[in-house]
């Protein structure tokens, strides 16, 4: 009998540990009930609702809110400015985090697409998704990084919890103002950390309905998942050199975590456990079933969105525009599409679909045929897509994703040409003469479509999947 009891206790212990392990791995980064609860915002009103004159008369309010605790006893408080048309409630809003506390202290005089959104009845909500040091709290960022390196708890890291939570809590703040907002569409736009943060938040918060994100992560490539072989190749290729800040979902933290006593297995386990909650690429089906509209501008030479080769091969259906030679600190190619107005067009189409009936271009398919001397490229859109132009770009023998060569060697001025459209099939084609010394060619094409909102025209562009051809 004792042996049976001991066996039962052993089995019970094993089952308990398995349950605990599964629970730990499945733990949600965000408590969405808490995120949506306005009673915990601890709102401090800095400027109550007031009328503000400008190109359009608006009503505006500035508050600070408690996003929540990063760790026990450490609140994360930030300002939120809300802007609505003066003559009615705003139905939905454009949400941004690329602001500073000092900027939000000033009343907003909207212009450009934000002015048009307000004129059409949508609102604006602005908050702060920035490094704490940029607004005088460097110690908060340092303590956060140190705690995360020791614990590998994503809640302790501003990038994983505080920034996405800030955007979601700003939605809660606006919708608590029931006399000024009614529920509608919520589109989030931004670049870098303000591209990454909404890309994570939109997975969790179904109040968000559209996303335009630039120079920020999209997919779960081997480097991001801390694949040891991928990182060994990366480091051997000079990957620790200054200029590469790519990690799992932003700046690389691997060395700090290892220095804190963790192992590569720990890094891999962390990346595996959290990635479903981080990457748009792992949530495409659910996002599309919600009707979320998305467009990404990752850049072709960006130190954060550094894995275009892998992404193009594994996620060709994600809509993106590739500005040639663009990225953090990059000026762009001499032939880059300077008339590109993707963000404005996406916002206007999203908020006012009855007035902007024409959809933006969706991703096309790409096909290549290799001969001894040329590479023929064919790009196909769905019938009646309305694309107006095609231009192809290529670069020979580019370095591996994330390598110094990948980031530094730009597409030459001469490596671009207009494509030809077949009048019957609608296909876009181009031929690239193969350099006899080249071992591979990376390529993509960009295509224009013009949409109209009221009396204004907007030129939009979408790219074919980034493609690498081994010669």
Image (spheres, helix red, strand yellow):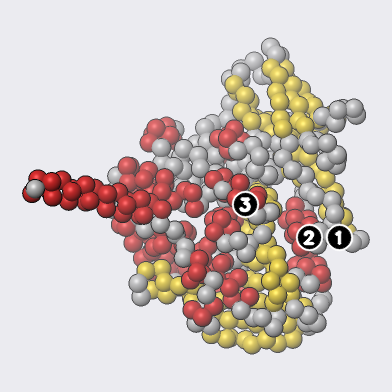
Whichever of callouts 1 and 2 sits on the residue coming sooner in the sequence is 2
The residue lying at 49 percent from left, 53 percent from top is 277
Q: Nearer the viewer, mark 3 or mark 2?
A: 3
Residue 76: percent from left, percent from top: 45, 73
Whichever of callouts 3 and 1 sits on the residue coming sooner in the sequence is 3
The answer to whether one can see residue 462 in this image is yes
Rendering quarter of residue 409 = top right
Q: Is residue 35 above or below residue 21?
A: below
User: Where is mark 3, residue-wise?
Assistant: 287
Mark 3 and mark 2: span between their CA atoms? Answer: 20 Å
Q: Nearer the viewer, mark 3 or mark 1?
A: 3
The residue lying at 17 percent from left, 51 percent from top is 9
The residue lying at 35 percent from left, 54 percent from top is 24
| Residue 60 shown left or right of residue 249 in the figure | right
- Most distant residue in the top direction: 372
Q: Residues within 10 Å of mark 1 (few under 14, many from 20)?
A: few
Rendering quarter of residue 93 = bottom right
> Which disc is residue 278 wearing?
none
Q: Helix or strand or loop: what does disc 3 sit on? A: helix
The residue lying at 42 percent from left, 65 percent from top is 141
User: Where is mark 2, residue-wise?
Assistant: 348
> Which disc is residue 355 wearing?
1
């Amino acid at each position: 009998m004792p042996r049976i009891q001991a066996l039962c206790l052993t089995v019970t212990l094993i089952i308990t540990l398995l349950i605990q392990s599964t629970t730990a791995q499945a733990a949600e980064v965000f408590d969405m009930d808490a995120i949506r609860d306005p009673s915990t915002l601890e709102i401090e009103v800095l400027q109550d609702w007031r009328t503000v004159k400008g190109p359009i008369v608006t009503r505006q309010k500035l508050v600070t809110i408690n996003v929540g605790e990063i760790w026990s006893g450490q609140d994360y408080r930030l300002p939120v400015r809300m802007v609505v048309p003066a003559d009615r409630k705003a139905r939905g809003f454009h949400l941004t985090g690329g602001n500073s506390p000092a900027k939000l202290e000033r009343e907003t005089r909207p212009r450009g697409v934000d002015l048009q959104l307000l004129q059409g009845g949508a609102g604006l909500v602005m908050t702060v998704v920035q490094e704490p040091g940029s607004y005088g709290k460097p110690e908060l960022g340092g303590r956060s990084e140190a705690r995360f390196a020791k614990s590998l708890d994503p809640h302790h890291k501003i990038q994983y919890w505080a920034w996405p939570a800030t955007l979601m809590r700003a939605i809660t703040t606006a919708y608590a103002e029931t006399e000024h907002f009614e529920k509608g569409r919520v589109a989030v736009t931004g670049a870098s950390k303000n591209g990454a943060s909404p890309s994570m938040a939109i997975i969790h918060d179904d109040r968000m309905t559209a996303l335009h994100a630039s120079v920020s992560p999209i997919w779960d490539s081997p480097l991001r998942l801390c694949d040891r072989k991928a990182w060994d190749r990366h480091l051997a290729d000079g990957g620790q050199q200054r200029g590469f800040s790519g990690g799992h979902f932003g700046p690389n933290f691997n060395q700090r975590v290892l220095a804190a006593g963790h192992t590569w297995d720990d890094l891999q386990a962390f990346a595996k456990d959290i990635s479903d909650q981080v990457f748009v690429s792992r949530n495409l089906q659910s996002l599309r079933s919600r009707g979320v509209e998305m467009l990404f501008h990752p850049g072709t030479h960006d130190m954060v969105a550094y894995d275009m080769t892998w992404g193009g091969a594994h996620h060709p259906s994600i809509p993106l525009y590739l500005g040639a030679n663009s990225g953090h600190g990059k000026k762009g190619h001499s032939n880059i599409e300077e008339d590109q107005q993707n963000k404005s067009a996406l916002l206007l189409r999203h908020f006012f679909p009855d007035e902007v009936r024409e959809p933006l271009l969706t991703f096309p398919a790409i096909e290549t045929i290799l001969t001894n001397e040329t590479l023929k490229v064919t790009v196909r859109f769905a019938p009646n897509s309305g694309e107006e132009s095609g231009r192809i770009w290529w670069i020979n023998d580019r370095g591996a994703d994330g390598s110094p060569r990948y980031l530094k060697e730009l597409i030459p001025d001469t490596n671009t040409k207009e494509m030809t459209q077949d009048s019957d099939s609608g296909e876009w084609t181009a031929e690239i003469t193969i350099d006899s010394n080249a071992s591979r060619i990376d390529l993509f094409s960009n295509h224009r479509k013009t949409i109209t909102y009221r009396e204004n025209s907007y030129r939009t562009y979408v790219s074919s999947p980034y493609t690498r051809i081994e010669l």
